[in-house]
Image (tube, rainbow, N blue to C red):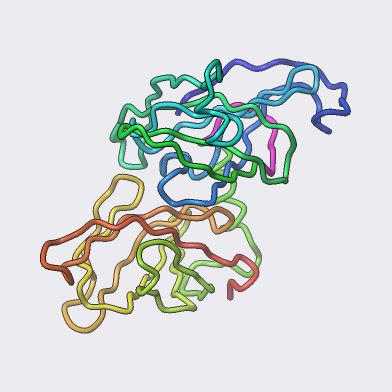
Amino acid sequence: MLIMAGCSGTEKTADSGIADGTYVATFTTDNSMFHVNEANQDKGILSVKDGKMTIHVSLQSKKIVNLYPGLAEDAKKEGAELLEPTTDIVVYSDGYEDEVYGFDIPVPSLDEEFDVALIGTHGNWYDHKVVVSDPVEGDDIQAVINGNAADNAASSDFTDGEHTIEVALEGGTGRASVESPAVIRKNGDEITAVITWSSPYYDYMIVNGQRYEPVNTEGNSVFEIPVASFDSPLEVIADTTAMSEPHEIEYTLKFDPASLK
């Protein structure tokens, strides 16, 4: 996780609506190929100074080489000021470290969509919509993630044992789905979800850099994977053997905390 130094202060300003300082905020996008690295679970460091906001996010790889705070057509114009990447180190739950690109992105407002264009290693520009929301004071992403998990675990209705929760799947071709509600198992601070696919051809999943094998040998593929928080989308990779060659496909699992039983 990258930790950035922030500003201090308590005075609220008209531009941002929150006090100058440093926050952990949620950064969500309209596309599963452009998102915060799985290790940081849609979280970035939001810096507020004199009412102006900037969020630093560590992406999933080094495949996005520049961002532009606006539309792709403007990014292509002569003199456009592109956002340059930083090299960030992310740490997955199993301790594996990886180098990825990160960016400091100006934030015009919280809880509202704004435009961010990107260009990848193939030299093509793409338009995207992003939203920054839910700022929590501090500069430690993992502490906020762990705190969310603890809040879920501390729920009076969420005791050790088996529970269920509604879950939706996004990404891929849209033809795959997962069984909902899904079984949730809690054992102390450890929370796992039983994900049952609509196909028997998924032979492994990758969650936070860790590979998981099916827990069944017959019928549709079933996996038991860790869940740190029900409040944030969970980015996963699932490998399918249904095609002529195996393919790893990126998906997003979205849990509904209100449905937890």
Q: Is residue 239 left or right of residue 138?
A: left
Q: Residue furthest front?
A: 78
Magenta stretch holds residue 239: no
Give whichever of 62, 141 is nearer the camera: 62
Residue 259 in the image: above or below residue 80: below
Q: Left or right: where does residue 214 sit relative to residue 113? A: left
Q: Residue at x 80, y 17 (%)?
A: 50
Please state the horizontal and vertical placement of residue 62, each as a whole percent of the image: 33, 30
Residues shaded magenta: 133-141
Left/right placement of residue 48 relative to residue 187 reads right
Residue 77: x %, y % from top left: 53, 24
Q: Name the side, left or right, on which 7 lies relative to 58.
A: right
Estimate the x, y position of residue 57 in percent, counting from the top left. 51, 31
Nearer to the camera, 122 or 104: 122
- As drawn, 85 above or below 230: above
Q: Quadrant of the C terminus?
A: bottom right
Q: Quadrant of residue 239?
A: bottom left
**Residue nearest the observer in this picture, 159 or 32:** 32
What residue do we see at 66% from left, 23% from top?
47
Q: Position of residue 8 (x, y in %)?
A: 75, 16
